[in-house]
Image (tube, rainbow, N blue to C red):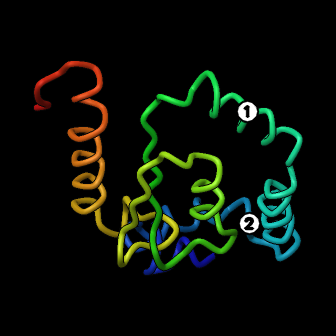
Amino acid sequence: RFAASRYGAGRRMSKADRRAFLGPWRSRASRRATRQVLAALLRIDPVMATVEQSLQTRLAGVPVLTLFGRKNDPYGWQARFGQIFPRATAAGIADGHHFPFNDDPDAYSAEILAWWTEKVATTDGASSIS
């Protein structure tokens, strides 16, 4: 519900759009089930171990950007991604919540552009982006 409020994606939605967005999560049981699925992602260590091994070997040189809203990371993904991608660039949107691209689209795109210019464009030989 919070994501569809004035603090999340919902602040730019019409009443009808907000109702459609919330449709699958009308009941408390549906919302609880969704939270449990997301929380279970933190316990997928065997899968993550394989991913981490690949990241540290075959994909170690690939540029990675993690970009989160600083006001909403209830499952600690930013810290977890910092462990998984130790050479990643971690960025955050100061006033961002669950949908930081919606909270501050200009800051969000500026972070991506700055990272791309510094880490990707220089890596692949491109001189600039338009």
In front here: 105 or 68?
A: 68
Q: Amino acid at mark 1?
A: Gln
Single out the mark in the foreground, 1 or 2.
Answer: 1
The residue positioned 46% from the left and 74% from the top of the image is: 70
The circle on residue 25 is 2
- Sequence-first disc among 1 and 2: 2
The residue positioned 86% from the left and 48% from the top of the image is: 45
Q: Quadrant of residue 7?
A: bottom left
Q: Amino acid at mark 2?
A: Trp
Spatial CA distance of label 1 from label 2 is 36 Å
In front here: 58 or 41?
A: 58
Is 1 drawn above or below residue 36 in the view shown? Answer: below
Question: In the picture provided, is 116 more to the left or to the right than 68?
Answer: left
Q: Position of residue 124 (x, y in %)?
A: 28, 20
Is 49 drawn above or below residue 130 in the view shown? Answer: below
Badge 2 marks a residue whose secondary structure is helix
Question: In the picture provided, is 97 more to the left or to the right than 56?
Answer: left
The residue positioned 48% from the left and 79% from the top of the image is: 71
The answer to whether marks 1 and 2 mark residues whose Cβ atoms lie closer than 8 Å is no
The residue positioned 41% from the left and 64% from the top of the image is: 100
Disc 1 marks which residue? 53
Q: Quadrant of residue 41?
A: bottom right
